[in-house]
Image (tube, rainbow, N blue to C red):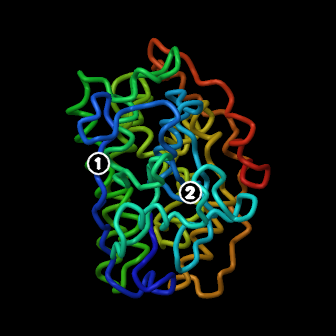
Amino acid sequence: MGSADDGNSSYGRKAFKRSKSRFADRVTADGRDGWPVEAGRYRLVVSRACPWASRAVISRRLLGLEDTLSMAIADPIQDDRSWRFTLDPDDRDPVLGIRYLSEAYDRRESDYPGGVSVPALVDVPSGKLVTNDYQQLTLDLATEWTALHRDGAPDLYPRALRDEIDTVMAEVYEDVNNGVYRAGFATGQEEYEEACAGVFRRLDLLTSRLARQRYLVGDTLTEADIRLFTTLVRFDAVYHGHFKCNRWKLAENEVLWAYVRDLYQTPGFGDTVDFDHVKRHYHQVHTGINPTGIVPLGPDLAGWLTPHHREELGGRPFGDGTPPGPPPPQERVPAQGRP
């Protein structure tokens, strides 16, 4: 998720098109792109507001990479230079020494014309951006970073299920992950209605699928669940009202509401979610949609901790592995962002 070309006021006022990741180098076990997997070498820059970045935050937690891949958390409120480190002392990231993520982009390519997006993986020694390819990044964390995984880390992209996982993820991306944005940033009625209808058509199909199985593919958590979760967890808080995806609330869909609560209550998922960052980012940054910048008080978060009963469907969340331990103290979500 990045800044719009003409600043925050352009959201909702020009046709929406998700830009491709321009910097798609990969950090791999064999270092074939010049970036080998190495403990302590890279810094993951994220916003807790952003669903695309949240995929990487969850994967990092589940795989136990906290000690080997450090993480910078940007302020959820962007200015015209995009993501900034105003949550840190002196308004600078303490590891990279920069005030804006755009500085790491500039070190990679000066006068880069595109938006500055998260997640971003930055090479600490040079301060250069390595990749902003949010689609590939988490797959590589699961498959290329295995030497640095914690004991008991789950297999989030099991080889035998990859074709099915890829198919499910492609459908979820088109209609749900990206569909809510196409609805929310639509500039005409017909464009909005088509996108919104697509969102709920896919959610209805996912409801049927998840009524009979605990997870999207197989009987364990996979990358597919991470990618659906990061949209569903934001649904009632921002997509229902702010993006007008309001045929029904997630809390009104018994199956999906139980599914997303099951994930939220699973270590590594809910403990990465900051509802305060989510609500303030969408409502205060997208001034083209919400010119007053007023942030709604609701919805009530208490329901996220209620019993979901999804364990009755079976399934083994971590397969032959184990849950991650608690998040490091400095990465704990502040009280105002939690139920």
Q: Residue furthest right?
A: 335
Residue 274, image x and y in percent?
Answer: 66, 52
Residue 192, image x and y in percent?
Answer: 35, 77
Residue flagged by tag 2: what amino acid is it? Ser
* Label tally: 2
Q: Which quarter of the figure is the N terminus placed in?
A: bottom left
CA–CA distance in space, label 1 to label 2? 21 Å
**In front: 3, or 246?**
3
Label 1 or label 2, whichever lies nearer to me, is: 1
Q: Residues within 10 Å of mark 1 (few under 14, many from 20)?
A: some
In the picture of the structure, the residue carrying the numbered disc 2 is 47
Taking the image as shown, residue 26 lies to the left or right of residue 285, namely left
**Rendered residue at 74%/64% (across/down):** 90
**In front: 172, or 152?**
152
Q: Residue furthest left?
A: 163
Q: Residue furthest top?
A: 320
Q: Which mark is residue 151?
A: none
**Rendered residue at 62%/76% (across/down):** 284
Taking the image as shown, residue 224 lies to the left or right of residue 86, namely left
Q: Quadrant of residue 167?
A: top left
**Rendered residue at 51%/15% (across/down):** 152
Residue 72, image x and y in percent?
Answer: 59, 50
In the picture of the structure, the residue carrying the numbered disc 1 is 25
Q: Residues within 10 Å of mark 2 (few under 14, many from 20)?
A: many
Location of residue 296 with respect to 329 vertically, above or below:
below
Taking the image as shown, residue 319 lies to the left or right of residue 304, namely left
**Rendered residue at 49%/28% (across/down):** 63
**In front: 337, or 103?**
103
Q: Secondary structure at mark 2?
A: loop
Q: Which badge, 1 or 2, is on the more N-terminal residue?
A: 1
Residue flagged by tag 1: what amino acid is it? Asp
